[in-house]
Structures are given as C-alpha cells and as structure tokens.
Amino acid sequence: MNRIFLILLIFIFFSCGTQKQLQKIYTGKPETLLSEKFGNPKTIIEQENGKIYIFEVIKNLESTEVNQGKLTLDPMISPGVKKTERYFFTVEKGIIVRTKYEEEYER
C-alpha cells in the first residue's frame, strides 16, 4: 500500500510541474502563439533545423516576515530578491517542438 502511494505521489509531482505544463500547452502549436503570450523574444538562436526563442520574465519579490508559528521579539525577515524566469521554445517549420523552463534568483 505504501509503495502504491509513493509511486502515485512521484507521478503527481512530475506531472504537475511548470516544465510539464509548458509541454502540454505549447508543444505542437504554431509559433505565433508565443508572441501573443510573451511578447517579443529576448534572444533568437538560429540552428540548422529551426530556431530557439528565449523569453525572460523578471519579477521583483519583496522581503517578507517568516512566520515561525510562535511569538518572537526578533522576527525573521526573508530578503527581497529578483526572480528571472526563462522560457526556451524550439521551433521547427513554424511549429513548437520542444520547451524548457529555468528560473534564477538574485539578491
């Protein structure tokens, strides 16, 4: 019983990630869908069999107090960071064939 639960948990973990959602939404769709959602690409890399479009989304995450579940005189505060999300789309003959997602945090 525990093995079935563990296998189910691992399956749900890998099927609900951002990378898997990108594959479901964009793979097999035309490249015009990208400009509607992300705007102009940050970089376009030409390859012999297609192009790689790279889009960046930058968000500033504010610092916030970390809840410790108890009253303290000196609260813990997480630092503010800049979050950069990079979306890579490989396009061949006008159709998206591969997706990749990266995120980076910078203090």
Image: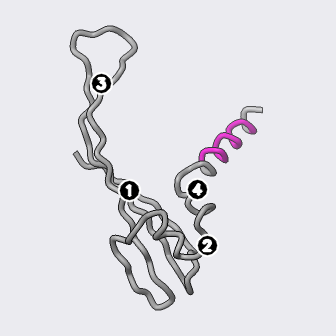
Work out whether mark 2 precedes mark 3 in sequence or the reverse, and give the earlier one. 2
Q: Nearer the viewer, mark 2 or mark 3?
A: 2
Residue on which the image places disc 4: 21
Position of residue 70 measured from the top left corner of the image (x, y, whole percent) = 36, 10
**Mark number displayed over residue 65:** 3
- The amino acid type, in three-letter code, at marker 4 is Gln
60 lies above or below 100: above
For image coordinates 26% across by 43% down, the residue present is 81
For image coordinates 39% across by 61% down, the residue present is 86
Work out whether mark 2 precedes mark 1 in sequence or the reverse, and give the earlier one. 2
Residue on which the image places disc 1: 85
For image coordinates 48% across by 63% down, the residue present is 37
Work out whether mark 1 precedes mark 4 in sequence or the reverse, and give the earlier one. 4
Residue on which the image places disc 2: 29
Position of residue 106 measured from the top left corner of the image (x, y, whole percent) = 25, 49
- The amino acid type, in three-letter code, at marker 2 is Lys
Residue 5 falls inside the magenta stretch: yes
Mark 3: few, some, or many residues within 10 Å (few <14, many ≥20)? few
Main SS category, magenta section: helix
